[in-house]
């Protein structure tokens, strides 16, 4: 449940910031509903880009550290649900971008208002793709550690009577 909420929140915020970055680079000031509010001097969108970086880092920190004291199965559930739902949202965004590229233009288009517009733009943000890739890596590593723990746990206690632990050496 936490991974799903984190995914939806992450995609919404990154999509929102991506749409704002596109707007400010073209000199457009967009409202919260993605409608054109004003026209201004174009700027590079550094604050929006920085915001995307911060949001991506926060999402990854949550995936890495939030469930750390929880059992590995809970960590895997959080990471897997985030990765799966983020993948679906980015895939939908990318497919819609490809199929409706010539149709999705102005602020009057229904697909570009509110969350639909944010979802539409998250697929073109490389930070979202990198965050997805790292979350998939976390799912894979958590799965491997969980399998290793189950394998060593099934083997029983060590010769000194203590339960065996898994350690990763790099």
Image (cartoon, rainbow, N blue to C red):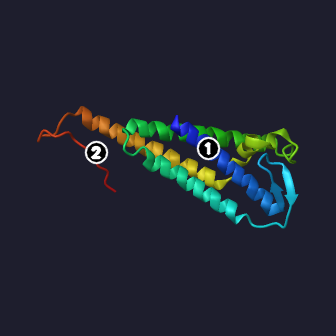
The quadrant in which residue 99 appears is top right
Specify the quadrant that holds the C terminus: bottom left
Mark 2 sits on what residue? 166
Residue at the farthest left position: 160
**SS under mark 2:** loop
Front-most of residues 165 and 22: 22
Question: Compared with residue 101, is residue 53 higher up or lower down, i.e. above or below?
Answer: below
* Front residue (pair 10, 121): 10
The picture places residue 67, in percent across and down from the top left corner, at 42, 43
The percent coordinates of residue 22 (x first, y second) are 77, 57
The vertical placement of 26 against 160, above or below, is below
Which numbered marker is on residue 67? none
Residue bearing the label numbered 1: 9
Residue 168, horizontal then vertical, whole percent: 32, 51
| Quarter of the view holding residue 115 | top right
> Can residue 124 be seen in the rendering of this structure?
no
**Mark found first going from the N terminus, 2 or 1:** 1
Camera-nearest residue between 39 and 109? 39
Asked where in the image residue 21 lies, by quadrant, the reply is: bottom right
Dot 2 crowding, Cα within 10 Å, few <14, some 14–19, many 20+: some
What residue is drawn where x is 61% and y is 50%? 129
Q: Is residue 104 above or below residue 1?
A: below
Name the residue: 13% across, 38% down: 161
Q: Label 1: few (<14), some or many (≥20) within 10 Å?
A: some
- Tell me what residue is drawn at x 84 percent, y 67 percent: 41
Label total for image: 2
Does residue 162 appear left or right of residue 105 in this picture?
left
């Amino acid at each position: 449940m936490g991974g799903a909420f984190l995914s939806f929140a992450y995609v919404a915020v990154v999509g929102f910031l991506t749409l704002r970055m596109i707007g400010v680079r073209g000199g457009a000031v967009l409202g919260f509903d993605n409608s054109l509010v004003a026209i201004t001097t174009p700027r590079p969108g550094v604050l929006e880009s920085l915001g995307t970086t911060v949001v991506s880092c926060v999402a990854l920190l949550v995936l890495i550290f939030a469930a750390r004291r929880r059992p590995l199965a809970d960590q895997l559930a959080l990471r897997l649900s985030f990765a799966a739902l983020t993948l679906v949202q980015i895939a939908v965004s990318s497919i819609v971008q490809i199929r409706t590229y010539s149709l999705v233009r102005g602020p009057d288009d229904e697909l570009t208002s509110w969350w639909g517009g944010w979802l539409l733009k998250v697929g073109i943000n490389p930070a979202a793709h990198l965050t997805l890739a790292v979350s998939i890596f976390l799912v894979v590593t958590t799965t491997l550690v969980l399998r290793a723990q189950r394998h060593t746990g099934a083997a029983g206690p060590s010769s000194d009577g203590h339960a065996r632990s898994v350690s990763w050496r790099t």
